[in-house]
């Protein structure tokens, strides 16, 4: 089974979650009815691109270009799979 088999072709955040920058936390957070998840910078950058228009490969390529790095595909996929498992990503 391919690594991305559990992910939609163009991942997006579930309507139950809202991503926003929280000045008090000095971080990006994922808000949902029962609480909040404080995100690290890498996770926030990945989730900010989950808008239903970009593929996983396009998200990865955009981040690699933005941060001048290569080979981050496995980390991007891992975070998205965990997000799908938790219901953040649909």
Image (cartoon, helix red, strand yellow):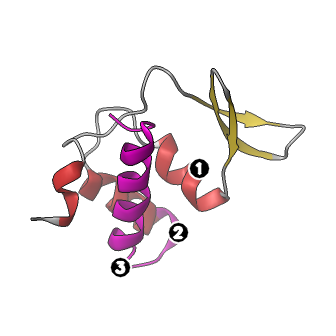
Can you tell which mark lies on residue 27? none
The residue depicted at 28 percent of the width and 34 percent of the height is 53
Mark pair 2, 1: CA separation: 14 Å
The residue range painted magenta reads 66-90
Q: Name the residue under label 3.
A: 71
Circle 1: is it few (<14), some (14-19), or many (20+) Cα within 10 Å? some
Q: Quick check: 4 left or right of 71?
A: left
- Between circles 2 and 1, the one closer to the viewer is 1
- Residue at the spot x=65%, y=58% of the render? 41
Crowding at mark 3 (Cα within 10 Å: few <14, some 14-19, many 20+) = few
Residue at the (48%, 52%) spot, across then down? 46
Q: Earlier in the sequence, mark 3 or mark 1?
A: 1
- The quarter of the displayed image where residue 40 is located: bottom right
* Image mark for residue 44: 1
Where in the figure is residue 86, as x and y percent of width and height? 45, 43
* Residue 67's disc number: 2
Earlier residue among tags 2 and 1: 1
């Amino acid at each position: 089974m391919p690594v991305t088999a559990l992910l939609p072709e163009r991942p997006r955040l579930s309507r139950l979650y809202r991503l926003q920058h929280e000045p008090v936390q000095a971080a990006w957070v994922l808000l949902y009815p029962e609480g909040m998840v404080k995100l690290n910078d890498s996770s926030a950058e990945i989730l900010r691109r989950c808008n239903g228009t970009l593929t996983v490969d396009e998200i990865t390529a955009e981040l690699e270009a933005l941060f001048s790095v290569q080979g981050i595909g496995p980390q991007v996929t891992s975070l998205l799979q965990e997000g799908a498992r938790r219901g953040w990503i649909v």
